[in-house]
Image (cartoon, rainbow, N blue to C red):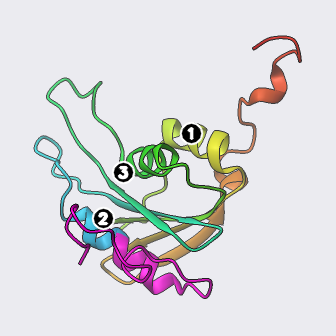
Amino acid sequence: MMAPKSQPASRKERGQTKDHPESLLLEAAWEVRERAVATYSGFKVGAALLTEDGRIYTGCNIENSTYGLTVCAERVAIFKALSEGAGPFVKIAVVTESPRLTPPCGSCRQLLWEFCGDIEILMANRQGRQRRVRLSKLFPEPFEKSFFRPNDK
């Protein structure tokens, strides 16, 4: 359980360890999934993003009645991490109850590529299935900054 906001979380609570077992990453993703706001679809997703120095940033999907303003779990985790100055990133876990393992959507793939590069993605479900894949396999031809001319900002 995370420490109250008034107290900084301990290194263990923030997942700050060099030897970081995947079980802790998955546990964090499952825990945050319970806080998903999936009022309309009922499809709850949890994500846990691991930094190179062992910190974990979590996110859950948050739906809105317009759907266009819905934010995916992976994006919430990325935004939280970036807003805290975290990075570089080495792995993200994505968990759902779906019998089929659920990869990040197209928008999340684009943001993952932009801010995490060819990150390892660990997908898991409650049936015990897991799959590890590099983002480049799911997103083989990303649009990225290399397309811009050097003088364009």
Instruction: Identify the residue position indicated by label 3 in the image.
Output: 73
Residue 60 falls inside the magenta stretch: no
Residue 118, horizontal then vertical, whole percent: 72, 54
Q: Would you identify the image quadrant in which residue 132 lies?
A: bottom right
Q: What is the magenta range?
A: 1-28
Spatial separation of the CA atoms under disc 3 and disc 1:
12 Å
Q: Regarding mark 3 in the picture, which secondary structure is present there?
A: helix
Of callouts 3 and 1, the N-terminal one: 3
* Label 3 with label 2: CB-CB less than 8 Å: no
Spatial separation of the CA atoms under disc 2 and disc 1:
23 Å
Residue at 44 percent of width and 79 percent of height: 11
Residue that sits furthest to the right in the current view: 150
The answer to whether 101 appears left or right of 60 in the picture is: right
Residue that sits furthest to the top in the current view: 152
Q: Pointer 2: residues within 10 angstroms few (<14), some, or many (20+)?
A: some
Instruction: Identify the residue position indicated by label 1 in the image.
Output: 111
Q: Regarding mark 2 in the picture, which secondary structure is present there?
A: loop
Q: Which one is nearer the viewer's eye here, 34 or 89?
A: 89
Residue that sits furthest to the left in the current view: 39
Of callouts 3 and 2, the N-terminal one: 3
Q: Pointer 3: residues within 10 angstroms few (<14), some, or many (20+)?
A: many
Which mark identifies residue 136?
A: none
Residue 149, horizontal then vertical, whole percent: 87, 15
